[in-house]
Image: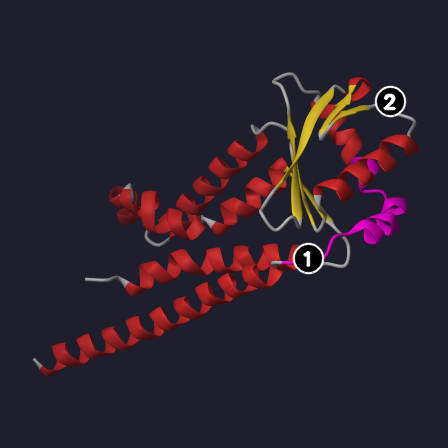
């Protein structure tokens, strides 16, 4: 039998995740997320899938007999720490929402030149010796409204990445970011997918409530 409620639990966080991505693309200024923030955001979107999947599959019935409903709180806390552990152990990388590759390259040029930090480009590969960075710019999707800056090579200086991130996020770069911001095409698609997930979830919850009411009425008749 199709379980409406469990399917709705999986869809609601995914819908919220898609709506948040659309919000980042629709902002008047580009938004920079590092690897930790990006992983935590994705983990939030997948929490429903974790609840109806591994958390329910390996549910500790012995703990539930003692703690009751608090068992779910401990399981969700465990899930959060697993996601946090995975986020903190990721290689340094960035995701920039609202810019294409050429615009993000121009932004990096302006940020490094303002601090007089020597750097080199090989196509879309950035080499900053003083910061211990070798990274590559690549599109995050086919629409060209988000880009990744991913490490190229195993040896990276995390402090160098953090220093350049602080430079980019300074207030003085926001006007220039606004000028080179690419049009947030495709954000409507994310909104449509997110809204569809939320609407389908609400329909499934209502259908599940109606099914429960019919079941209760049938039991009372017997």
Which quadrant would the N terminus be assigned to in this image? bottom left
Taking the view exactly as shown, the residue that stands out farthest to the bottom is 221
User: Which residue is more in the foreground, 28 or 53?
Assistant: 28
Res 173 quadrant in image:
top right
Q: Is the magenta stretch mostly helix, strand or loop?
A: helix
User: Which residue is more in the foreground, 149 or 47?
Assistant: 149
Residue 170 lies, in percent from the top left, at: 85, 42
In this image, 214 relative to 79: left or right? left
Which quadrant would the C terminus be assigned to in this image? bottom left
Residue 211 lies, in percent from the top left, at: 24, 74
Residues packed near mark 2 inside 10 Å, few (<14), some (14 to 19) or many (20 plus): few
- Residue range of the region highlighted in magenta in the rendering: 166-185
User: Which residue is more in the foreground, 188 or 171?
Assistant: 188
Q: Is residue 172 magenta?
A: yes
Taking the view exactly as shown, the residue that stands out farthest to the left is 222
Kind of element beneath mark 1: loop
Q: Residue at x 28, y 41 (%)?
A: 58
Q: Residue at x 65, y 33 (%)?
A: 93
Residues packed near mark 1 inside 10 Å, few (<14), some (14 to 19) or many (20 plus): many
Name the residue carrying label 1: 184
Q: Does the magenta stretch include residue 33?
A: no
Name the residue carrying label 2: 118
Give how far apart the Cα atoms at labels 1 and 2 are: 32 Å
């Amino acid at each position: 039998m199709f379980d409406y409620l469990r399917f709705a639990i999986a869809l609601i966080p995914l819908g919220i995740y898609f709506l948040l991505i659309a919000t980042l693309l629709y902002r008047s200024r580009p938004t920079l997320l590092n690897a930790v923030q990006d992983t935590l955001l994705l983990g939030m979107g997948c929490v429903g899938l974790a609840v109806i999947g591994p958390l329910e599959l390996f549910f500790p019935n012995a703990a539930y007999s003692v703690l009751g409903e608090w068992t779910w709180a401990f399981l969700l806390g465990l899930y959060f720490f697993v996601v946090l552990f995975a986020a903190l152990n990721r290689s340094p990388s960035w995701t920039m929402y609202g810019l294409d590759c050429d615009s993000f390259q121009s932004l990096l040029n302006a940020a490094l030149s303002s601090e007089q930090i020597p750097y080199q480009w090989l196509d879309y590969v950035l080499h900053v010796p003083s910061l211990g960075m070798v990274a590559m710019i690549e599109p995050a999707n086919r629409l060209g409204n988000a880009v990744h800056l991913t490490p190229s090579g195993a040896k990276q200086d995390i402090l160098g990445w953090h220093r350049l991130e602080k430079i980019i996020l300074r207030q003085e770069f926001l006007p220039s970011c606004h000028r080179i911001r690419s049009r947030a095409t495709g954000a409507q698609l994310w909104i449509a997918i997110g809204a569809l997930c939320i609407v389908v979830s609400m329909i499934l919850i209502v259908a599940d409530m109606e099914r429960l009411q019919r079941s209760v009425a049938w039991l009372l008749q017997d």
